[in-house]
Amino acid sequence: MAEAIYLRKVTKRFSGNTILKQVDLDIPAGSVTVILGPSGSGKSTLLRCINHLEKLDGGTIRVGEELVGYHQKGHTLHERSNRDIARQRREIGMVFQQFNLFPHRTVLQNIIDAPMRVKKQGRQQSIDKALELLKQVGLAGRENEWPQNLSGGQQQRVAIARALAMNPGVMLFDEPTSALDPELVGEVLQVIKQLAHSGITMVIVTHEIGFAKEVADNIVFMESGSIIAAGPTQQVLDDPQNGRVREFIATVL
């Protein structure tokens, strides 16, 4: 089931540098939110904080009603156990720039591993679901291939199917096309478009402005660790007050 995401005063530092500066953001359940901004603005770090791949230095993130990565006792936050964090991550799918497929496992084995191992799902049920997902991402009949025999775009589509196999309520995409040759970008974006508004909350970091215009309900524009514009897509892109947004878009189009 799609879940809303709530960020409150989210702060993250690396080596004394503040990468996220008290970020507040609400992402509605079932919506598609695209995060734009120049390199180094904190977009990917923000995404990684949502499933606790990065620990916060301040603030809180909730997915639905539950605090991510921490539980609260009185006014103090304590980090959850590894088991509890793993449980939370089952509900939050993530697709990275690099496809991170296991090279020594077939496409099918890559997809069924987590549902069987983590969710204790039966083998046949996992296989049936995997084959259905491969059809959904345009790779029917490729289940016995090795990852190295697939193009980058095909590998990324397998990675999307693998994330979906866990039935997540939230999907995070961290620049899913940035490692691809230009001619392969479209096939991956098409799969993501088809997922939009399918009952999953989607947060996508990308530089693909045309895709953002077409798919996003909301756009968040980040710079230097802060959100400088956020709201419905057309409002953010067309608002004359958002001069910095328009300037950025002009450089990437």
Image (cartoon, rainbow, N blue to C red):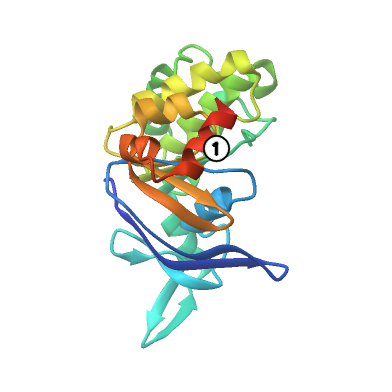
Furthest residue toward right: 15
Residue 116 lies left or right of residue 15; in this view the side is: left
Residue type (three-letter) at the residue carrying disc 1: Phe
Q: Residue at x 35, y 40 (%)?
A: 239
Q: Residues within 10 Å of mark 1 (few under 14, many from 20)?
A: some
Is residue 84 at least partly visible in the picture? yes
Looking at the picture, how far across and down is residue 156, in whole percent?
Answer: 56, 27
> Which quarter shows the C terminus?
top right
Label 1 element class: helix
> On the image, which quarter does residue 212 sit in?
top left
Out of 11 and 168, give the one closest to the viewer: 11
11 or 95: nearer the viewer: 11
Q: Residue at x 47, y 23 (%)?
A: 189
Is residue 167 visible in the rendered image? The answer is no
Residue with the most extreme bottom position: 74
Question: Count the marks: how many?
Answer: 1
Question: Going by the image, does 235 lie left or right of 146?
Answer: left
- Which residue carries the number 1 mark? 248
Residue 137 versus residue 15 in the image, above or below = above
Residue drawn at 70 percent across, 71 percent down: 16
Picture coordinates of residue 200, whole percent (x, y): 32, 40
Give the residue displayed 60% in from the left and 43% down from the top. 38
Name the image quarter holding the N terminus.
Answer: top left
Q: Quadrant of residue 71?
A: bottom left
Q: Which percent across, then down, holds residue 6?
A: 35, 60
Along the line of sight, the residue nearer the viewer: 253 or 216: 253
Q: Position of residue 61 (x, y in %)?
A: 41, 64
- Asked if 14 appears above or below 229 in the picture, the reply is below
Relative height, residue 162 to residue 149 (above, below): below
